[in-house]
Amino acid sequence: MPNDLVKLPQASVPATMGSSDLPTLVDLGGQAARFAWDEFFYAEHHNPYTQKAYMAAVKRFLAWCEGQGLELMTITPGLVGRYLVGLGGSPAKRNLHLSALRGFFDRLVQRHVVILNPAASVRGVKDDVVEGKTPQITIDQARTLLKSVDTSHAVGLRDKAILATLAYTACRAGAVAKLRLQDFQNDGTQYVLRFQEKGGKSREIPVRHDLEGFILAYLDGVNIRMDAKDSPLFRAGNGRVKRLTSNPMSSKIICELVKRRLKDAGLPMRISPHSFRVAAITDLLTQGVPLEDVQYLAGHAEPRTTGLYDRRQKKVTRNTVERISI
């Protein structure tokens, strides 16, 4: 087969064992260490963001160890603890580094490069988060935003359908960007959207009547209902001509879309696509919808995670601060 018929994207081609890109300590650890490196980063972790973050964390730690004159076999739990303290930053940052080191050294133990995992007994940093940082979009603001979109052209039809999808499904921008035509389907009783979520999870969410109308209006308005089923549901635009291409959107483009629409509607620019997720979760909990139902809609493994999105009774009002007697 000619070489030019099969071309993999640059990012998808793993570094070969023994590559100059390997940390020195891994290279000096021999074939088993190099195998463990390849296995941990390229076989176990397929999410490019996790792979990049974990690799950066492990490389930084191993470079620090090399500067201390250490080898893989001589790294102790105390050294890992000292490194994390010196690393500084937020608890989330240090816990991410610790998670990466635990996973990597587990592979080294399995491949008999080291005897024990020096990161296994190191305690993470307690991170008491009672509320997420994402600002909430209010119900009135969300309604204003949807009403402000001009649907006399293809871009407006698309944008209104995307904003409504964010508002009425509580899904992440990345999951919306991944939607294909085949993911919007009628199951015989209603339309559903099938989302590909974080961690490879797939979920079906029923489409409420107004969202159904927005998506169908978009599909008919841009005449793509009969396109290939694996083609993107939401298409990227073509500059200022208010036309759509056949290319898929990205979460970054969706974020830019939301910011542009917020500006046009005169709404706060601190709002993001994730703000719709916060609003939907808070609104449903306010109405008394059971936490487990809201948790399933949000796709959270733990109810505590859903609780981070709950903004009920968690705001300091201006009336409170006005009463400070200074």
Image (spheres, rainbow, N blue to C red):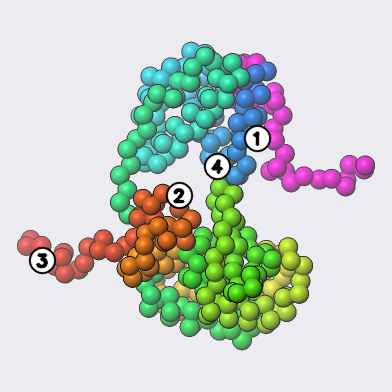
Q: Which residue is mark 3?
A: 323
CB under 8 Å between callouts 3 and 1? no
Q: Nearer the viewer, mark 2 or mark 4?
A: 2
Label 3 element class:
loop
Residue 51 lies, in percent from the top left, at 58, 39
Label 4 element class:
helix
Label 1 amino acid?
Ala
Kindly identify the residue that appears in the image at 72 percent across and 70 percent down.
245
Horizontal relation, residue 321 to residue 289: left or right:
left
Label 3 to label 1: alpha-carbon separation: 58 Å
Upstream in sequence: badge 2 or badge 1: 1
Residue 86 lies, in percent from the top left, at 37, 29
Q: Which residue is mark 2?
A: 301
Label 4 amino acid?
Thr
Q: Quadrant of the C terminus?
A: bottom left
Label 3 amino acid?
Arg
Res. 166 mark? none
Label 4 to label 1: alpha-carbon separation: 13 Å
Res. 43 mark? 1
Residue 67 visible to an observer of this rendering = no
Label 2 to label 1: alpha-carbon separation: 24 Å
Residue 265 lies, in percent from the top left, at 45, 79
CB under 8 Å between callouts 2 and 1? no
Magenta span main SS: loop
Instruction: Please identify the quarter of the rendering in which residue 52 is found.
Output: top right
Q: Which residues are magenta?
A: 1-30
User: Extreme front residue here?
Assistant: 188
Label 2 element class:
loop
